[in-house]
Amino acid sequence: MSLLQNIFAFKRNREDIEPFSRPSVFAVLRYFVVVLSLIFGALSLYGLGSGGSFYLYVAQDPFSPGVKPWYAESVLHVGLTHLLGFDKTHLQMQLFVLSFGISSVMFVGIIVWRRFSELWAYILMALLFFHPLLMILFTWSLHPDAVTVFCTAIIFFTNSYVAIFIFALFGAMNHASQMVIICTSAIVCRVLLENNYRFALTVGLGWLAGKGLLETYLGYHGIIIEKNRLQGLLDFDTDTFFDLFMQSPWWTLFTLHSVYWILLFGMLVYGFWLSKRAVIALVISQSLALVFGLITYDTTRVHAVLGWAGFTYCLLYLLQRLDTKPRVPRYLFYAIIAVSIIGSIAAPKKYKFYDIKGVEKHQNHFAEILRKYQIWEKIGLE
């Protein structure tokens, strides 16, 4: 077996996956060095934004009754922030919430390491760190998105029905309207590609239980939502859509996937060779994200949170199938992945929120944060 064949050797079927043996100390160190490098790379590109700063004030008093705006529906991430004491400053809450997003990528990396190889774990983590999703999580760092992404990762990439039920429940309490779309996308992917109907029942019951607990929580504490997210969505009429979309349609579409549009089209082409069902799952999951992203004001943010897991799940499925089709040009597919990652790093960092904005709109550079909070002095470097 050549070096390249050894590097890209995949376990073909789920039955071929060996129990995940304890990695060596050096392997664990390599893993965390790669993760830290990716974190600092993301910070250098995106900074640490202050988007959603109003959530800090909700977290400081999450149980007070009264009529509240739509964002008071997200009770999980503000509740955790308050109960664990990370509600004193913006930086505390930013780092706490962002840790869920980083943990999501690390979790997917471990899954890929187990099912494929250590190298592919690093490749997939790099792909996610430079995907628009992580740009959104770093930029809109106080929004509930990172917790939603963590719940999504568990739902898509674990086989524990207990964990699937629990995190579908948590996801509904964190952002019920986004989670219903995510659960639908997960059901489409895992039923089509795994014939896993038990998963569909489990995730559906989890979401319903979470929605029920959310309504119970709001009612118990006397919290009335003035206009919930569904009502806000219904107010988004056709004229508003065209006014916003036609301001900069090409930039809007670019921000949704950045250079990963190349990989998306490559996945569709290879999907026709490898698995028609994967094409259907990919199209449905990305269409759900596209439709609901385009009918909201923060288009890129919503699309990224709704669409990343279906995109990643189908990519991993195609990579697994690729090893069973020796006549399919696999190294071209690997090259598409590499070009997409490199291109995304170099591409402009923009998102759609009413109009096209750069990340500097919400950006606080990491060095400025260190100076502002006197981090260097606290750790003895000055």
Image (cartoon, rainbow, N blue to C red):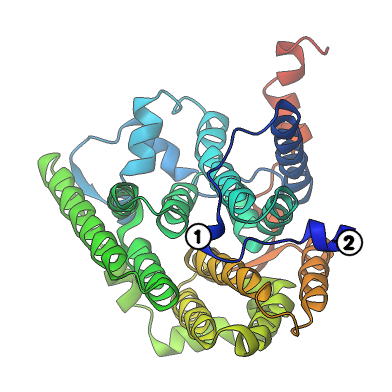
Badge 2 crowding class, 10 Å Cα cut-off, few under 14, some 14 to 19, many 20 or more, is few
Q: Which mark is residue 95?
A: none
State which quarter of the image contains the N terminus: bottom right
**Residue highlighted by disc 1:** 15
Query: Visible in this render: residue 170?
Result: yes
State which quarter of the image contains the C terminus: top right
The residue depicted at 40 percent of the width and 66 percent of the height is: 182
- Left or right of 207 on screen, residue 278: right
- Left or right of 311 on screen, residue 306: left
| Above or below 52: residue 283 | below
**Residue highlighted by disc 2:** 2
Q: Choose between 364 and 243: the one closer to the eye.
A: 364
Q: Earlier in the sequence, mark 2 or mark 1?
A: 2
Badge 1 crowding class, 10 Å Cα cut-off, few under 14, some 14 to 19, many 20 or more, is few
Kind of residue at badge 1: Glu
Q: Residue furthest front?
A: 1
Kind of residue at badge 2: Ser
Location of residue 212 in the rendering, given as x and y in whole percent from the top left corner: 15, 54
The residue depicted at 55 percent of the width and 45 percent of the height is: 107
Location of residue 59 in the rendering, given as x and y in whole percent from the top left corner: 37, 35
Location of residue 192 in the rendering, given as x and y in whole percent from the top left corner: 41, 78
Quadrant hosting residue 336: bottom right
Q: Choose between 200 and 86: the one closer to the eye.
A: 200
The residue depicted at 54 percent of the width and 85 percent of the height is: 279
- Left or right of 366 on screen, residue 70: left
Q: Secondary structure at mark 1?
A: helix
| Above or below 244: residue 301 | above
